[in-house]
Image: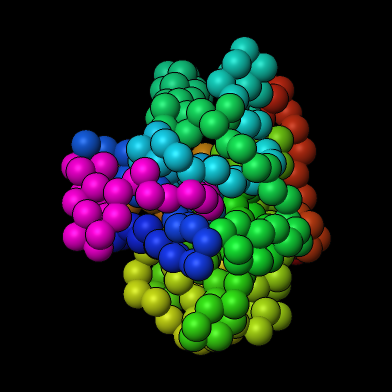
Amino acid sequence: MEWPPQEVCVYILETDDDVVAVDAGVGTEDGRDDLLDTLDRHGYSPGDVDHLLLTHPHLDHVGGVDLFTEATVYAHEDVSYYLDDGEDRVEETRRKIQEAGFRGGYVDEAVEGSLDVVRQNREHLVPEDVDVELSGDERFTAGGVEFDTVHTPGHQHQHLCFEFDSADGRALFAGDAVAESFRSIIYDVGFREGMYEAVESYYTAFDRLRGRDVDVVYPGHGPVFHDLPAAVDQAEDSLDRLVERCADTLRDLGRATTFDVTLQHAESQDDFRNRIFDDAGALGYLEKQELATSELEDGVRYFEPVE
């Protein structure tokens, strides 16, 4: 299915007992039609699927959940927390946006934009539709297949990978945790408590993936590949460069908010929205490594480099 970056993958695993699907495509009219057409070309309908495994609750991975009417739905145990848009969530989001250094009308715009993303995802994945809640490092059976879950935060805090035995050896449904040619943007918790831990969380995910003995990887975007350690190394190198770039920018600015740092990096408004969480996580990581300090002043967090 077409979707930046070029395609979205939905996988079908047919076993002796049942049919298992991994992820549910894009939540647009064209995406849902494409999902139905693609399933039909391969001799399936959504009603044939007995088990639906979701790697993470993003619009391009949960867009067709409601089509799989006969499936048991599996997802991370904190999906309902991510999809919450109640009053407490709104207040927390506003507080973290102000802490990041947004000013004036940008605050309201960022709050609405952030919550709109959550609400769009919630339209396609209703928390009550999750039948089996999973944690990391948990083994479960679906359709007669034993899957090991791997909690891989960073791109999204509720992200899971699924490892299993296939005809081609040990295999991994990787979602957006790792791909062969790019590193997914950081979102992790969004504008919530923990936003400055996002880069550290991504490093943790890479550590968990690097040590796995996997023969073939089925990513959420891009081609199937076989060298998991190389893909992890490439993504981690990208993360290293992000941290270095933020360190350089902070040294140039001297004292800055996350908003100030991202203004130096972003090439467009869309680029700014994608980079703000990368930079927040990188600044938090610099502080964790004692390469920066921060202080909260009138609700705004200012970072300074450690010389």
Q: Residue at x 56, y 21 (%)?
A: 85
Q: Residue at x 59, y 77 (%)?
A: 165
Q: Is residue 245 left or right of residue 112?
A: right
Residue closest to the eye, 84 or 136: 136
In terms of image quadrants, where is residue 257? top right
On whether residue 127 falls in the magenta region, the answer is: no
Q: Is residue 157 left or right of residue 289?
A: left
Would you place residue 15 above or below residue 280 in this image? below
- Residue 305 position, x and y percent, is 70, 56
Work out whether residue 126 or residue 271 is closer to the camera in this orientation and state it: 126
| Span colored in magenta | 30-54
Query: Colour scheme used in the picture?
Result: rainbow
Q: State the residue in front, 238 or 224.
A: 224
What's the residue at 44%, 65% (across, down)? Answer: 14
**Per the image, is 44 magenta?**
yes
Q: Is residue 65 left or right of residue 140?
A: left
The C terminus appears in which quarter of the rendering?
bottom right
Magenta span main SS: helix
Residue 29 seen by the camera: yes
Q: Position of residue 135 (x, y in %)?
A: 73, 50
Quarter holding residue 251 = bottom right
* Rendered residue at 19%/60% (across/down): 41
Residue 233 to residue 303: above or below: below
The x, y position of residue 247, in whole percent, is 61, 62
